[in-house]
Image: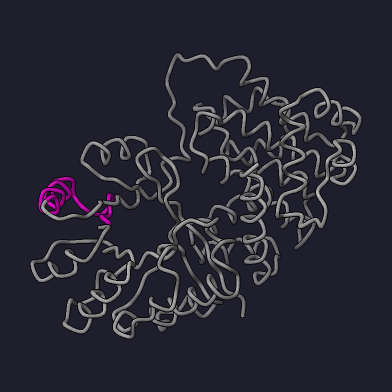
Amino acid sequence: METYVARQPIFNKSKKIFGYELLFRGGMSNFFPDIDGDTATSRVLSSSFLLIGTEKITGGRRAFINFTQDLLVKKIPLMFPREKTVIEILEDVEPEEDVINACQEMADKGYCLALDDFSFRPEYMPLISLAKIVKIDFRLTPPEEISELVKELSHNDVDLLAEKVETHEEFQKALEMGFVYFQGYFFSRPQILKGRDIPTFRITLMQIMAEINREDFQFDELEKFVSRDVGISYKLLRYINSAYFSRMENISSIKQAIVLLGEHELRRFLSLTTMTKLASEKPDELVRASIIRAKFCELMGGRGGLMIKPSALFTLGLFSLIDAIMDDSMENLMEKVPLSEGIKNALVYGRGELNHYLRLAVCYEKGDWEGVAKMAGILGLEEEDLPRYYTDSIYWADSFMVI
């Protein structure tokens, strides 16, 4: 049975990635209420640490994983590396003596404990004293209650994590209230400022991205992009020699690297290099999310009932967060780039066959497994292939991000 693991980013105050919470589903049976938390957590642990590899899922960063009361008492977290594992204690865990003793042992051995969906109760004080992180749902918890929780926890040596932060305004408010970590998709939304002109060089970069991905663009022209730019040439050599390609010997010739990549892969390389320049002032996770979507959508191309070209789906995914990168509306930006009407309709209006692929990608990254199943059904895709596409996309994106 395929195991589905998605990841949700957790940022520090500088909008740098601190870790990822792993979101899990193990097959269609998990849509039904009889799936228990112990089974879910056990599967995510075996999948992420044993089958897939935590490095591949989190890029070497910390993995936040939910643990039930029974798994805590059995001290299951001690089976996994303390440097990479954040033990999330679920809100329904009762602070009984055996739970506190188990958590004390984990804390003594250097594990990071986090209290999930926290709501203060006096009997939780023993767990609060052991925890390093307290997570507060920024959407479900009323503002006045959040203020009280922040005040109550200020007497303890814990860092506060704001969950479900979906706008830049919420991020700023949480920052001002004293939160240290932030979880949610605020980074993927634009900060639209009226009356603000987009610099010409950024529009040019965006147009280059679109031009590179045209079907009739010539290989000779692609090669010129590389050969006349020292920075791109350097990145190309680092990319071709990265762990993703697993070559026995390093490639040192620009020409050899271009030949080995081929036209399609070279297009993607140039697209991503340009995207990185375009988003130089944005959180790295925004670029990474764009790259993951691009590759994930591409891998779904040419399969299922619609048989959409992979190249068109790559471009769709790559441009899907351009509004957040450019801090402008998608409608305004699409007037400035030569993309197909199908891609524009999907990005601006959420319409057409291409939009189904984008919706599937967004559902997957958020762990909306019901949405994933629905969209896979519409597209005629084999659902059991999706976990492999997603993890391959993460690995590919992370390999590119280090160059």
Residue sitting nearer the eye, 11 or 378: 11
| In the image, residue 153 above or below residue 316 | below
At 81% across and 34% down in the image, what residue appears?
A: 214
What residue occupies the far left of the structure in this picture? 122
At 34% across and 81% down in the image, what residue appears?
A: 75
Position of 254 compared to 171: left or right? Answer: right
Residue 273, by quadrant, is top right
Q: Is residue 251 magenta?
A: no
Q: Position of residue 266 (x, y in %)?
A: 81, 40
At 29% across and 45% down in the image, what residue appears?
A: 180
Region rendered in magenta:
135-154
| In the image, residue 160 above or below residue 175 | below
Q: Does the magenta stretch include residue 144?
A: yes
| In the image, residue 230 above or below residue 32 | above
Position of 324 compared to 396: left or right? Answer: left
Position of 9 compared to 124: left or right? Answer: right
